[in-house]
Image (tube, grey):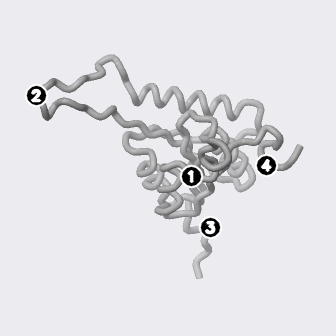
Amino acid sequence: MVNQVEEHDRRIVVGVDGSAGSRTALRWAMSQGRLTGAKVEAVSAWQGPPVYGFAYGWSPSVFEDVDLAAITGKMLAEAVEDEAAGRPPAEILTRVVHGHPSQALLDLAHGAQMLVVGSRGHGAFAGMLLGSVSQHCVQHAPCPVVVVPPTDPERDEIGSRR
C-alpha cells in the first residue's frame, strides 16, 4: 500500500483575493505549513472585465493603462507580507494566474496536500453559506479542502476563546 503523504507534494494551496476572509485563510495556511513542514502556495487569479456592445457594432472598451496581472500581483505580495509579519517563518510561494478563481485553484490543487479557501461572513444566515468559489472548490477539489471561517474578534487566530 502506498503512503498517502508520499503521493502529494508537500504543498498547501491557498486562495487570496485581498478580502479579510482570504487573509484569514492565508494565516491559517501559513500556520498549517509551519506545523507540517509544507510549502504554502498563495494563489490569486485575475480576469479581464467582460466586453459589452461588440455584437451591436460598438467598439469594445479597452483598458489600455490597466495591467490587471500586475495589480493582482501587488495585492498578493502585500497580503503575504502583511500576514507573515511578526509570525514565525513559513515557506511561501506566490502565484498570479489568469482565469476564474475557482478553476485556477482547482488546477493548482492537483497533487497538493490540501486547498485552503476563506468563506463569506455576512451575518447570521448569510454567514452559514459558502461563497461561490469556496462552494465550487469543496465540490470539485482533487484534494482535501479547508474552508476557514471569518475571524471572530472574541477568538484568537486558531479559533480558541481568549
Tell me if residue 61 comes above or below residue 19 in the rendering. Answer: above
Q: Earlier in the sequence, mark 4 or mark 2?
A: 2
CA distance for labels 3 and 1:
28 Å
- Left or right for 46, reference 35: left
Q: Earlier in the sequence, mark 3 or mark 4?
A: 3
Amino acid type assigned to the residue bearing label 4 in the image: Gly
Q: Earlier in the sequence, mark 3 or mark 1?
A: 3
Q: Residue furthest top?
A: 65
**Residue occupying the point 43% across, 48% down:** 104
Mark 3, mark 1: which one is toward the viewer? 1
Say which residue label 4 marks: 159
Figure label count: 4
CA distance for labels 4 and 2:
55 Å
**Residue occupying the point 75% across, 53% down:** 35
CA distance for labels 1 and 2:
39 Å
Amino acid type assigned to the residue bearing label 2 in the image: Gly
Say which residue label 2 marks: 57
Amino acid type assigned to the residue bearing label 3 in the image: Val
CA distance for labels 1 and 4:
18 Å
What element does badge 2 sit on? loop
Q: Which mark is residue 130?
A: 1
What element does badge 1 sit on? loop
Mark 4, mark 2: which one is toward the viewer? 2
